[in-house]
Image (tube, rainbow, N blue to C red):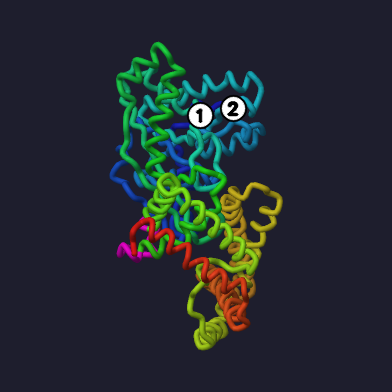
Amino acid sequence: MISFDNINKFDRRYDLYNHYLRFTHNYFYYKKFYVVGRENIPPRGVPTFVISNHQNALMDALAILYLFDDNRQPVFIARGDIFKRDFVARILRFLKIMPTFRTRDGNRSDIRSNHDTFDLAGRILGEGGTLAMFPEAGHQHGRYLSSFKKGYPRIAFRAEELADFKLGLQILPLNIHYSDYYNFRGKLLVTVGKPFQIDEELLELYRHEPNKAYLELNEKSRAIIKQMTLDIEDPEYYDEYDQLRLMLDKPMASLHRKKVDYLPDLFQEDKKIIDNLDKMRTDQPDSFSTLMGKTAEYIKGLRQLKLRDWIINKKVTVWSLFVKALCLLVTFPIFLFGFINNILPFQFSKLLKRKVQDRQFYSSLNYASGVILAFPLMYIILLAVVWGITGHFWMGLLYVLLSFATLFYFYAYKIYCIKFWASCRYMNFHNTKNATLTHLRELKKEIMGIYMDFCDLK
């Protein structure tokens, strides 16, 4: 295994590379990147251990990295099995990621090497560095919080121990929330909680019963992050809970006079919806059972008609469809230009995703293959071709800038088309008096009514 001893040293090449990635991440890949609680971030130079929920592979690490605006270079700790190849390990070291091994990741020598990693992590924190880790030790496949593993508290206590228990380590809890896990131009929210320290009672417990101290710090930390995150605990009703929050968050935000397109407000409504459903399950089990049954039936009907919830009970007229069709027709040349010059990079990421079974890696592949490789390469080729044809560099540069600008319109046009055809199909179902659609409309009203009655919002 290669050495990670100097991984926390400031790297100018890494800094230059990060300026490009920060821009593309914060302003290009995501439509909006919100940070709530930035004032809670300890100043650079204060020993800071960042812990967060983990639901979206590489994108979670980037969300943490580009949260900071003070030019610091946090060191990340990731699962050790991805470091097995020397070439990959060198790339990860350049990206300031070092390994920790789980029992299932490797042999005993790998597990023993964790002691070196924990000592190095403790030294990084002792020198006033910033360390980031996902205590769940693996990304989850949905909006829930898994159990915390022992790696995080072992590092935290080891850092204090190396500083003779006088480090004053700041543990910074985060919640990372996505409007869409998988697709380009979604919205990202990072909520920064108040930092906390390991209290004297826990430090004393660590001196005598370290395993018990690990467990208690994990329990305390998980409880803090659980209060911050969206945690759908019961896998039996995960689909129903998720569908209900998507159905209800915008109506509830509107009812509470909040912005329906502002992700931080929608996230708070989502949390209230999940909490209310949990409360209904305890206080009114019969109503909860009825609600879950009707929601499961609603999901089945949506899948049968291949429709989404947003279109149900929406007013769709011939005139509105005509206006939308006219807009699509008039702006088609702009779409076509964007399509011709940007479709190949999009298709490249699709080819890669076909070989990946874990959907939580889709966004990471989109970002890595597109932003780092496919789009820059495509634009370099376009610049060279147009420059060669016209003999003018500025013509090639202008063509590339137009291609980049129409990328966003190309993607928005694609989404608009999908919604237009959904509206056409919906109107057809309506005109033919489709029984399933009629039932879905009634189900939606009943579902909304049950929830509103429980919350006493009528």
Say the numbered circle drawn on residue 194. none
Q: Earlier in the sequence, mark 1 or mark 2?
A: 2
Nearest the camera: 24 or 133?
133
Q: Can see residue 344?
A: yes
Q: Position of residue 448 (x, y in %)?
A: 44, 63
Q: Position of residue 307 (x, y in %)?
A: 59, 68
**Residue plotted at (41% across, 20% down):** 213
Decide if residue 439 is on the left or right side of residue 268: right
Q: Position of residue 425 (x, y in %)?
A: 61, 77
Placement of 414 over or under 144, stated as above or below: below
Decide if residue 336 is on the left or right side of residue 458: right
Nearest the camera: 321 or 427?
427
Task: Report how far apart the C-alphas of labels 1 and 2 lie in the structure.
Answer: 10 Å
Q: Position of residue 208 (x, y in %)?
A: 40, 11
Nearest the camera: 26 or 12?
26
Decide whether residue 289 is among the magenta residues: no
Say the numbered circle drawn on residue 149. 1
Amino acid type, callout 1: Lys
Q: Can see residue 396?
A: no
Placement of 20 over or under 342, stated as above or below: above
Nearest the camera: 11 or 289?
289
Decide whether residue 255 is among the magenta residues: yes
Is mark 1 in CB contact (under 8 Å) with mark 2? yes
Classify mark 2: residues with Cα within 10 Å, few (<14), some (14-19) or many (20+): some
Q: Which residues are magenta?
A: 254-265
Secondary element under disc 2, as helix, strand or loop, is loop
Single out the residue that lies furthest toward the front. Answer: 286
Specify the quadrant that holds the N terminus. Answer: top right
Q: Which residue is mark 2?
A: 102
Single out the residue that lies furthest toward the top. Answer: 208
